[in-house]
Amino acid sequence: MISIPQILSVCLFEFKRSLTFGRMTAYFILSLFPPAMVLLIANVSAFNGYQLIIMFLTYVVCILSLLLWATPNVYSELESRNWLFITTRPRGRVSLLLGKFLAASLSACLVCFIAVSLSCLIMALTVGRFRPDVLQELSTFGPKFTVIALIACVNYAAVFSLWGVLFQRRAMVIAAIYSLVNEFLFAAIPALISEFSVRYHLVGLTLGWIGWFIPEVEPDKETMEMWFAGLPLWVNILVLALIPVAALSISAYVIRNREYITVDEV
Amino acid sequence: MIELINATKMYKTVLGVNDISLTLKPGAYGLLGPNGSGKTTLINLILGQLRPTLGSVRLFGTNPVRRDDLLRRIGLCPTTHPELTRITALEWVRYLVRQHGFSMADSRVRAERALEMVGMTGAMHRAMNGYSLGMRQRTKLAQAIAHDPELLILDEPFNGLDPVARHEMTQLMKAFVRDGKSVILASHVLHEVEAIQPSYLLLSGGRLLASGSAREVRDMLTDCPNTIVIRSGNRKELLNQLMDLPELEAVRLGLDQESLYVTTRSSAAIFKRLPELNQQFDLKIRELRSSDSTLQQLFSTLMQIHRGQNRAIQGKQP
């Protein structure tokens, strides 16, 4: 059912196709948005929550880039009339899904990596010059959060790919609504519903790996568990490992079995 | 090779194809029908891209839905043109050949060879978005033949091709058939299909109107009004004599002072009487042909039957 060379071939082809002015501009803007914002706040020397700013902006950039690149996996092929050429090849549909997922994940990972790296570099070069503690924080925060950002990219790429497969049209709108409602709103509610979001587990992972990083507003253990980290770290890791597998498995099943109607039919 | 049993495809309330039953053995087939007649839907049913709402489809003896092994044996040249920027023909064809499981090196060799066969070697390193319509058609054909399929399905393959390119493509398809492979060529331009001398499948409104060789399809029309063109040096006398024939339905004068367009329900009867009349009245008949000799007329007549405009031979439809 899966052919690795075919998937890699689709991924490579997607990268070749993406070498357009529009796509490069999007890469550029998304990568530089978090560092630009960090540069604006870096001179506030008393500011201790810079990690939160970097995390939030990277999270936004991750979701935006994947909305652009992972969600229109089926729609873009149908619209650009490439669908039949690839889906009439053996395992073409699944290769297309996974190849595009891989390309979108790698693109988003690249964007997030640049965003986090430049943001940390800016903090080190500005605030870090007169605050050695910030330099020390960045040396652990930077690498750890980069890994978390990459995990977020893979998870959201899989979830948005699923939306793209399920909804032939307006998949991007539906994925955007999902992001706002589930990942921003429900994920912030201190109740069971928040555990059904990717963000909840990403926050749990962050607190487990990096710890609480704003000493002035450190919550007590009960508040922490209620709002952020009610599950053991291994559960967060397990869920974040299972989400891409589950989302891509469902996507593969749907894309393989569904009839997608092209505009040229009837 | 292909078998459809009462295959019907509905797109919600829209009928794609309607109750089609046919069996196709290996060979060349012309799938004819106007735009929107169901050709593309029929092709997608054969490929397993769509499932029939009713009935069944068999390709190489099995249900083609989700059968990857069958896709290896098919080359498809759809009617659509891919929108690709910055991608060269070689990259695109190579990418698609690679999807058949060929190695990178092998897929490059096959892509180059296929592009050479369609005359695209000189332009294969140029980006496809700068191609003319004809070049795109050639490239599409290259991706369909590059993996050496047993069955080639071509949907409107001659669109945008100049006469020389059409001839070259026709020769390519003829060679393909000569090699014992099969071709299904869908088109709404009949003379393009005639060139590969196929059996015909005539579609309209999602229905199969007729099928068989050109002669078999024409035989269905023996009782259908036919128009005969007769060129005579004595047109006036010819007209006088024809007016007495009971088989005559209508006569129209040609612009060239010699031609008569004779509409009859039984052209055989007219053909039988003409030599006798020619000799008896010195009609100087120079040319005798049926204006129905092109497939276009055949198709138009079948369309009339289908629409109920000619009920005389409706009982003979497949």
Image: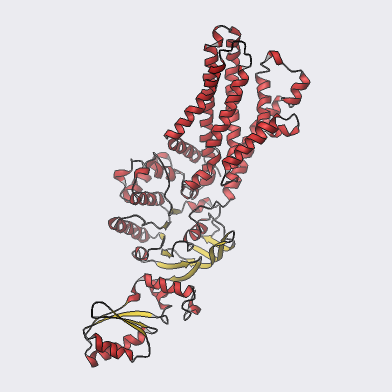
Q: Nearer the viewer, residue B238 or B148?
A: B238
Residue at the farthest right position: A222
Query: Residue A63, how many percent across, how many down?
Result: 58, 32
The structure residue drawn at horizontal position 57% and vertical position 61%, both measured from the top left corner, is B10
Query: Residue A169, how many percent across, how many down?
Result: 56, 46
- Numbered marks: total: 0
- Quadrant of res A177: top right
Query: Residue B209, how many percent across, how many down?
Result: 47, 71
**Quadrant (top left, top right, bottom left, bottom right) of the N terminus of chain A:** top right
Residue A248 at least partly seen: no
The structure residue drawn at horizontal position 76% and vertical position 22%, both measured from the top left corner, is A223
- Quadrant of res B292: bottom left
The structure residue drawn at horizontal position 59% and vertical position 50%, both measured from the top left corner, is A257
Q: Nearer the viewer, residue B97 or A167?
A: A167
Q: Nearer the viewer, residue A212 or B62?
A: A212
**In the image: residue B57, left or right of residue B190:** right
**In the image: residue B69, left or right of residue B273:** right
Q: How is the image coloured?
A: secondary structure
Above or below for A179 versus B219: above
**In the image: residue B266, left or right of residue A179:** left
Residue B303 at least partly seen: yes
Query: Residue B260, how many percent across, how many down?
Result: 29, 81
Above or below for B150 versus A74: below
